Image (cartoon, helix red, strand yellow):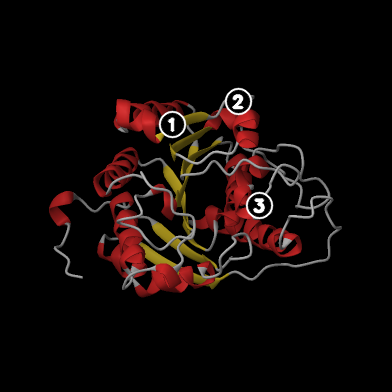
């Protein structure tokens, strides 16, 4: 099925401890994301890069927090842009660190609500990003988006209000292998479906993903997919500042995207934490483009042989 893909760059790096993610959107464009989507029969509209709406905000009592005003500004801007894009096509958000999802998901959730649809989120990440502004020890705000867009307490007066929070039971996290105690305790009180890498090693990816997608279909919901580079094994995707050994393999990642494509449920996509400064000749950017192509209909028999 042909889709109208809307590319939105989110050159956010203030949420991470290491600079470089601001170059992510351009790396994905250079790796020919648009051209790959067009080759599959989709139309592509590149709306360029979003700029943050930065306004002064009160200091937080957690002195470890970094770049609070900047991240709040990115959330405000991205929420508006993602809402508009979700109304007119299939938005693909080019990151940028994972704090951007605080804006993209809230915007898409608003658009889904206006269509009478519940939003579901497939979170592909080594980390759950379930800290609030009080619990984060590192102060890096790319560790907070899921807690924020599910409406958890601890953001009031600092981040924009969440108009349509995502229900925790509508979230499936896969690939977890680095979870702080505060996050584990907080998530234990929610209905989030959690599949760490041990669960995937023991049971595989197909059964839990198929179960989650069946719930999305039964609810006639919209599905947002958020893909963090560190979901993948560092050996195949080195361009990330938060590498955690033991990630998803090349085939596991493509299998997920192929299963998503078969259902036709995905309505929006985040590509996050790509740090080209840490890449090897564009290797990780090319892999993200290849995975996106699988999500949008590239089949195994269509896959070209590549040389690096």
- Residue at 24 percent across and 46 percent down: it is 251
The picture places residue 208, in percent across and down from the top left corner, at 37, 28
Nearest to viewer (mark 3 / mark 2): 3
The picture places residue 85, in percent across and down from the top left corner, at 54, 58
- Residue at 60 percent across and 61 percent down: it is 17
Query: Regarding mark 2 in the picture, which secondary structure is present there?
Result: loop
Residue 209 makes an appearance in the image: no
The picture places residue 242, in percent across and down from the top left corner, at 49, 55
- Residue at 16 percent across and 56 percent down: it is 302
Per the image, the residue denoted by label 2 is 188
Query: Regarding mark 3 in the picture, which secondary structure is present there?
Result: loop
Quarter of image, res 66? bottom right
Per the image, the residue denoted by label 3 is 138
Query: Regarding mark 1 in the picture, which secondary structure is present there?
Result: strand
Whole-angstrom CA distance, mark 3 to mark 1, is 24 Å
Q: Residues within 10 Å of mark 1 (few under 14, many from 20)?
A: many
Q: Residues within 10 Å of mark 2 (few under 14, many from 20)?
A: few
């Amino acid at each position: 099925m042909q889709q109208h893909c809307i590319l939105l760059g989110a050159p956010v790096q203030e949420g991470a401890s290491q600079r470089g993610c601001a170059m992510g959107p351009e790396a994905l464009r250079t790796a020919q994301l648009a051209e790959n989507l067009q080759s599959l029969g989709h139309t592509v509209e590149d709306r360029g890069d979003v700029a943050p709406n930065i306004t002064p905000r009160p200091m937080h009592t957690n002195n470890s927090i970094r770049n609070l005003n900047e991240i709040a500004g990115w959330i405000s801007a991205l929420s508006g842009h993602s809402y508009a894009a979700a109304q007119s096509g299939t938005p693909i958000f080019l990151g940028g660190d994972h704090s951007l999802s605080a804006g993209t998901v809230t915007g898409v959730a608003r658009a889904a609500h206006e269509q009478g649809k519940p939003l579901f989120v497939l979170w592909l990440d080594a980390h759950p990003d379930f800290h609030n502004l009080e619990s984060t020890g590192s102060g890096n705000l790319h560790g907070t988006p899921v807690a924020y867009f599910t409406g958890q307490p601890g953001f009031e007066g600092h981040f924009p209000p969440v108009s349509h929070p995502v229900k925790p039971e509508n979230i499936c996290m896969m690939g977890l292998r680095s979870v702080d105690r505060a996050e584990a305790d907080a998530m234990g009180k929610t209905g989030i479906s959690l599949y760490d890498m041990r669960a995937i090693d023991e049971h595989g990816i197909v059964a839990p993903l198929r179960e989650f997608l069946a719930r999305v279909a039964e609810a006639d919901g919209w599905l947002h997919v958020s893909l963090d580079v560190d979901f993948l094994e560092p050996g195949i995707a080195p361009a990330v500042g938060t590498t955690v050994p033991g990630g998803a393999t090349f085939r596991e990642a493509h299998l997920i995207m192929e299963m998503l494509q078969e259902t036709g449920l995905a309505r929006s996509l985040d590509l996050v934490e790509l740090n080209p400064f840490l890449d090897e000749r564009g290797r990780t950017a090319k892999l993200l483009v290849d995975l996106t192509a699988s999500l949008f209909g590239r089949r195994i028999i269509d896959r070209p042989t590549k040389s690096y």
